[in-house]
Amino acid sequence: MRRIFDISSPISEAPAMTGPEQVQLRFRWRNVARWAWPFVLVSLLVAGLFAADAWLPLFPREPGRRLTELFLRSLLIAYMSVVVLIPLVLAVSV
């Protein structure tokens, strides 16, 4: 088997890649997208929070207060729904 960094033989003598070797080297974008979307989503969320933190002092006080209250209310509702859903899912699964 020829090593990747072996420079002792010229390229013209290297065997052509056909068959299973070629299939193994193919990059499958569908698999990459399947595994990368959570990381992309979290990265966009963190970037958005950093951008909102930098722009929040430039907002007028009243709309900034409403945005903050909306965010905190939605966070509270999300926490409460998780607290309610976990026992329901556990009760149904038993």
Image (cartoon, grey):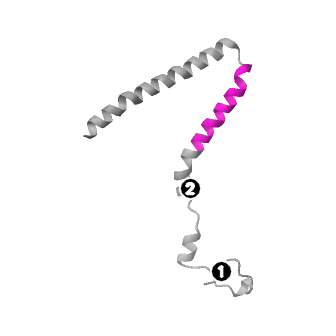
Mark 2: which secondary structure? helix
The N terminus, quarter of image: bottom right
Crowding at dot 2, Cα within 10 Å, few <14 / some 14-19 / many 20+, comes out as few
For the residue pair 26 and 73, the one nearer the viewer reads as 73
Tell me where the magenta segment starts and ends, as one range: 40-58
- Amino acid type of the residue that numbered disc 1 sits on in the rendered structure: Arg
Quadrant housing the C terminus: top left
Badge 1, how many Cα within 10 Å: few under 14, some, many 20+? few
Residue 12, percent across and down?
A: 72, 85
Question: Are discs 2 and 1 less than 8 Å apart at CB?
Answer: no
Q: Quadrant of residue 86?
A: top left
Question: In percent of the image, x 51 and y 25: which residue is there?
Answer: 75
* Magenta-drawn stretch, dominant element (helix, strand or loop): helix
**Residue 81 to residue 37: above or below:** above
Task: Based on the picture, tell me whether residue 57 belongs to the magenta stretch.
Answer: yes
- Please give the residue where the numbered disc 2 appears in the rendered image: 32
Mark 1 = which residue? Answer: 3
Of 24 and 68, which appears nearest the observer? 68
Q: Is residue 64 left or right of residue 28?
A: right
Q: Position of residue 83 (x, y in %)?
A: 39, 28
Q: Position of residue 48 (x, y in %)?
A: 65, 33
In 3D space, how far apart are the residues under numbered discs 2 and 1 (Cα atoms)?
Answer: 27 Å
Q: Is residue 18 magenta?
A: no
Amino acid type at mark 2: Val
Up-down: is 13 above or below 44? below
| Residue in the picture at 67% in, 85% down | 14
